Amino acid sequence: MPSTKPIATELVLKALLNEYNVLYGLAELRLNALDRRIPIMGGLLTAFLSSVPVLPETSQILALIAVPISLIWLVRTTINHARSFEDALRAIERKEHQINELLGQDAMRFQSRHPSKGSTVGGRTGSETVWTVILASGLLLGMSVVMAVSMHLEHPRLLVVFLIYIIGIVGMLVRSLCAWQKYKYQ
């Protein structure tokens, strides 16, 4: 009676390769999402600098409230994409090890031997994108404070409330950044 082991091994290998390809598709999706963050920040900086100063005072105040709070969403989604990209890279690495073990040789090794493996969450692209978005967010928050001060808000208390608001947003961004840096793939 012929052995079914080679057939079972072939089926397992096909399943692993299929999952490997799907994981690479997911990694590509996350990489593209990260790559889109930099132009978004450039557009936000340009729009903020060019439009807020020429808006009526009420609209300026609304922009000074809306833009800083939107940075929390942008930073957190960028960090989420970087973490998800890291998850995909580590899962790809795991598949490479499984395939190599099944084949009995190092046939696949790109992710498992990548130079930036384990050095940053989301690889070089994830790290650069997160830091760029964080720094641009800091710049936007600083510009918001300068604009608020230059508007000579009628009540000093209003300026104090705005500064507390900005400090709260900075705290949330720093908290998100710290959580990202501590992230480990499970």
Image: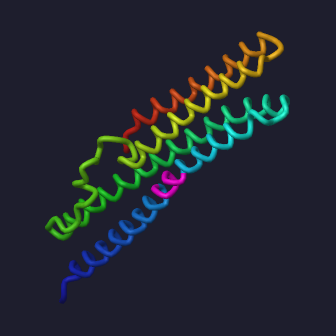
Asked if residue 175 is positioned above or below residue 74 in the image, the reply reads: above
Looking at the rendered image, the quarter that the N terminus falls into is bottom left
Q: Residue at x 63, y 28 (%)?
A: 143
Residue range of the region highlighted in magenta in the rendering: 31-36
| Residue 50 picture location, percent across and down | 70, 40
| Residue 54 picture location, percent across and down | 78, 36
| Residue 32 picture location, percent across and down | 49, 58
Residue 35: say if magenta: yes
Asked if residue 3 is positioned above or below residue 60 in the image, the reply reads: below
Left/right placement of residue 64 relative to residue 136 reads right
| Residue 125 picture location, percent across and down | 40, 49
Q: Residue at x 79, y 17 (%)?
A: 153
Left/right placement of residue 37 relative to residue 68 reads left
Residue 116: say if magenta: no
Left/right placement of residue 81 relative to residue 97 reads right
Outermost left residue: 105
Give the main secondary structure, helix, strand or loop, of the magenta stretch: helix
Q: Residue at x 55, y 30 (%)?
A: 138
Q: Residue at x 76, y 22 (%)?
A: 151
Nearest the camera: 130 or 121?
130
Nearest the camera: 19 or 59?
59
Hey, which quadrant is residue 164 in on the image? top right
Asked if residue 102 is positioned above or below residue 184 in the image, the reply reads: below
